Amino acid sequence: MTSQRILRIAVWSYIILFFGYLFGPLILMSLTAFNSAAFPRVSPWECFTIEWFDVLRQDDKLMAGLRHSLVIGLGVVLVAVPLGLAGALMLTQVSQRVRPIYYTIVVSPILVPGVVLGISTLIFWDRLGVMFDASYQSWFYDGTFLTIVGQSTFISAYSMLVFIARLQRFDPALEEAALDLGATHVQAFRKVMLPFLKPAIGSAAVLAFLASFENYNTTVFTIVSESTLTTVLASKVRYGINPSISALAVVIVVLTLIGAVAHEVYKRREQAAERAATLEAGGADMATVNKARAGAIGNPAVAVMLLVFVAGLGTVYFAGTVGVDECKVQVTEQKRRLAEERIQALREKRKAQREANQPTTPEARPSSDVKAKGSEGYGGIFAPDNLKGRAGETDPAGETKDEPRADQGLFSPGNLTGQTGADPKDGDPAEDDPEEAQGYQNLFSPNNLREQSGGGQ
Amino acid sequence: MSAGVELDNVWVRFGEFVAARDVNIEIKGGEFFSFLGPSGCGKTTLLRTVSGFLEPSEGQVRIGGKNMAGIGPNRRPTALIFQNLALFPLMSVWENIAFALEVKGVSKSERRKRADELLDLIALAGQGDKQVSELSGGQKQRVAIARALAAEPEVLLLDEPLSALDLKLRQHMRTELRTIQQRVGITFIYITHDQGEALTMSDHVAVMREGVVEQVGDGNTIYDRPGTAFVASFVGENNMLPGHVAEVGDSHAVVATEYGSIRARASAGSLSKGDEAYVFVRPESLNFADQTNRFDNELHAAIVQEEFEGNLWQVYLALPDDRRMTLSMVNDGRALSHPPGTGVKLGFDAGLAVALPKGPLAAE
Amino acid sequence: MGVIRYFQQFFNRNGLVLSSLLLGAVGFWIVFLIVLPQVFMLDFSFRFNLPPADLGGPKDVYTLSNYEFLMFGSPNNPEPLNVVDLSVFLRTLLAAVFVTLFDLVLCYPIAFYLAKSAQGGYARLMVLSLIVPFWVNEILRAFAFRILFGSTGIINAFLIWIGVLSEPMDFIQADIALYAGLGYAYILLMIFPLYNAIESLDTNQIEAARDMGAPWWRIHWRVVIPFAKPGITSGCTMVFMLSAGALAAPQILGGPSSLWFTQIIYQWFNTGGNWPRGSAYAIVLLVTCIAFVLLMMRLFKVKLGAIGR
């Protein structure tokens, strides 16, 4: 009995850990969107704010990418859903002998790395363009066209799988019945097959859109000189991060949750309706039928979820507008004081050092010295406020390009971004922002933080 | 309007497999015609060939005297009722019924009117707006018939449409189908593995085995004068005694069996002396023989078991080599009480037994 | 002859309009989206990187130089082999294997629980909450892991707080963030094949084994896992292929010193500007992945038809 109990506890802890792994990172990321710190983090917490949503909204590059992603997503839906449908219908008709080969061919794009698909699409149309002597303005070289085509290669296979699953439940006699009653093939398809496939068309379209919307591996090649939401995001994330990206994540997570709840409601309603129908057919009394019907509409769990959601949104908005500035002033003031204290301490220390080392090291290295000695000098370097200060002073873009080792040993987040930015193969000078480089000069200016978040991207 | 259907030397092959082998059948207009056979005998294949879902590999299908080669199912004057009915689940009852009119482009009001008329015919008036899933099995059955009739076919094809129903409903639907057929007067071609259905409803029955039509005839002929060993063993209960032909007459033969010489009917020319042959005698043609009741053929047997079925007694017997026989007799009020193992004498008249050339039998 | 007859039947079955549409769509998909691009990429990988003016000219001939470069590096490379690229390649494959095993071990218990223990609405809720995180953009998921594992991230803060670490650990440098992020990205692709396979196992078999006194681990080893083998292979194939071909997660979560093979391909296309060489690298990646998967299938005796959700 006890071993059973231990097993049960183990199972439950495992499930909790697993879903913690699944949701933890997303929840954490969502929280960082509401922290006023310039680097996305939850500890230490500075001020509750919704200003990152404003930053997000004013980000023209991101918004342009978003619009482009929507256009491409729509294009992919229009291409991939019909192709997937045709592929699935074909599968039901090819002979037993050909079926495995056919299936392997059309499913293979799912298994082929997205990078390879992107490259092959790019090359194929480029070569065709060369063959036809097309101009660079033609669609052989058009990022939107290439991306739609490249993504459709494998998204068609996704949607095909959706259709196959649905078609497995289709009774071929229905189509024959329609033909037998005098319908043409097109009529039978339109009036019998399509209505049956309608839910699958819906799910395939949603799936196709989402797959397109979030695709990166293929798109990054086929998009050529344009950009989509994911490519903009990727370059942002690689060259420096700020909580406006978390804010975007919050928006997407919320939309996803709404979608999931809507889906659940729809499914339950459908099930309840079915139950009611069968009850009626079975001659059940009306009370039971009505009860089943009511179950479809009044679902307490869903209602509670919506309520919590609306309340949360209200709280966020209210809290976000009140007292943010006050709190921020306090935080910056605190930071400034800390920084001053630190500088003071440093000065004193250096003075003491100078006195001690006077004969051997006469040369003074003003700024880099501060840095280099920083790691030894800061006794309390891991005090939370200390980190905060460092996060504020380093900036999203690769200022470390000139002296990539300067920050070695300091565990500031900017360090990481700096290094990624300085990564020789990914280095893109365009991302370096002169304004930010300047900001680096007055390391401990409290305004530093504001400037960067505002002027960064 | 009703049209006759003729199958001329029809062969249907699927690769190596032969589903129909040289089928020749003539079905008259307005007839209720059944194909009877065990599953896999090719009857559904023939039906699909008539309805146009299959093209014969060889031979011709003619409906109303017109060759149907190259004419698709949607352009043939036939309507098929599917085994699982194939009602469109996403359409209401009346939309199902009016589908054939919808694809012809008939206006909606006209369609609704015609659907209501047909709902009357199948005694479902006022139920047109229901969903198909809300109907009971028998109602679905009738809707399927109405839907097929709405296409105004000259030939209605039915593919075991009653097999999904329970026994009582099945028996009820038999009479109902027959009534509808007589009322609309079109040709019905009915497929079944249930001999009761075939015999009660049909004007003519074709018995099939492995793609071959073994015999065509009306119910009586099929039952009383089976043409082959298969038909004799498949249609109704039958006792079979194997042997060799010892003597051939005009309309009879004598077959030498392990249980003695048996005299039975045989059609002229079907048997010759020395052939292996089977004698078939139905349980209801068997009697207990004694000094007062004498029969053309008599056999010694032992009682295995007696079962009382109300109107009938079923007596299970064993011949000396343990071959099983069944005897059935009408319950006339005399209780039977032979203890198992009792030796009895069985008797039957030559006119009620039939001798047929040896051939494949129906599987038990 | 058979082909003609087949097409005849096809057209008979679907009518002229639908048949043409179906054939056209599937033909376009297979020929222009699937087959020809790969063929062109293969062809391109055997060519020199020429300026547009020289294309089709006398210099436009086939060469093995791109593949040679991957093997031996540039002509003035002092090493006998192209150590940098080859080691990245091997590391990518090994890391992909590691991610695959990690996901398999992680997902198997959940898939089993979902298939055999969870009840009705509760199971549905679990499935839904499995899917929801995967509607969130791949880049954002990687971003979340970067926040999580950053030096001021919650993990470092926690480890320092409980005293395991005295100073923040650079999880990104150590590639831990990358493995965690990649493992996370493909959980769904592992769970569902496993779930489908285990779900179709007759629960009575498990109970029979338990009845005969088998301990739980033996039930899994002897009954469940052999039965779920096609699902396991299917899931592992997908996860392996996708993690070996991943680009976003390594770009975002990879440390500065650790490259993923796809990143080298990306370089040849973007900053390197040498498409034929990039194609050759892509072909090597593709062929290796396929060979690896076929080998696995041969080893575990599973057919390709079992692959796919």
Image (tube, rainbow, N blue to C red):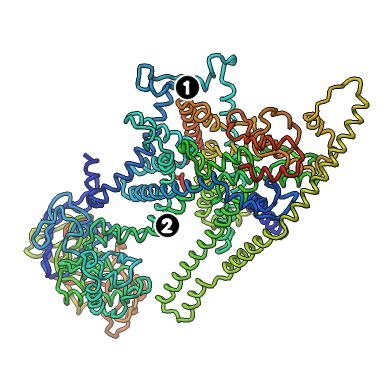
The residue lying at 41 percent from left, 59 percent from top is A199
Question: A52 or B68: which is nearer to us?
Answer: A52
Residue B362 image point, x, y percent = 26, 60
Query: Left or right of A412: which side holds A160?
Result: left
Position of the N terminus of chain B by quadrant: bottom left
The tally of labels here is 2
Q: Chain of mark 1?
A: C
Label drawn at residue A108:
none
Q: Quadrant of residue C3?
A: top left
Q: Residue at x 14, y 73 (%)?
A: B185
Residue A210 falls left or right of residue A239: left
Looking at numbered disc 2 in the image, what kind of residue is underneath it?
Answer: Gly
Q: Can see residue B142? A: yes
SS class of the residue under badge 1?
A: helix
Q: Nearer the viewer, residue A28 or B162?
A: A28
Q: Is residue C5 left or right of residue C208?
A: left
Label 2 SS: helix
Residue B363 vertical placement versus C297 (above, below): below
- Name the foreground residue: C305 vs C52: C52
Residue B60 sits above or below residue B202 on the image: above
Q: Which residue is mark 2?
A: A202
| Residue toward you, C197 or A278 | A278
Residues indicated by labels 2 and 1 sit on the same polypeptide chain: no
The residue at the point 52 percent across, 26 percent down is C272
Q: Of the numbered discs in the image, which one, if any, rests on residue C66?
A: 1
Q: Chain of mark 2?
A: A
Question: Compared with residue C149, is residue C206 higher up or lower down, i.e. above or below?
Answer: below
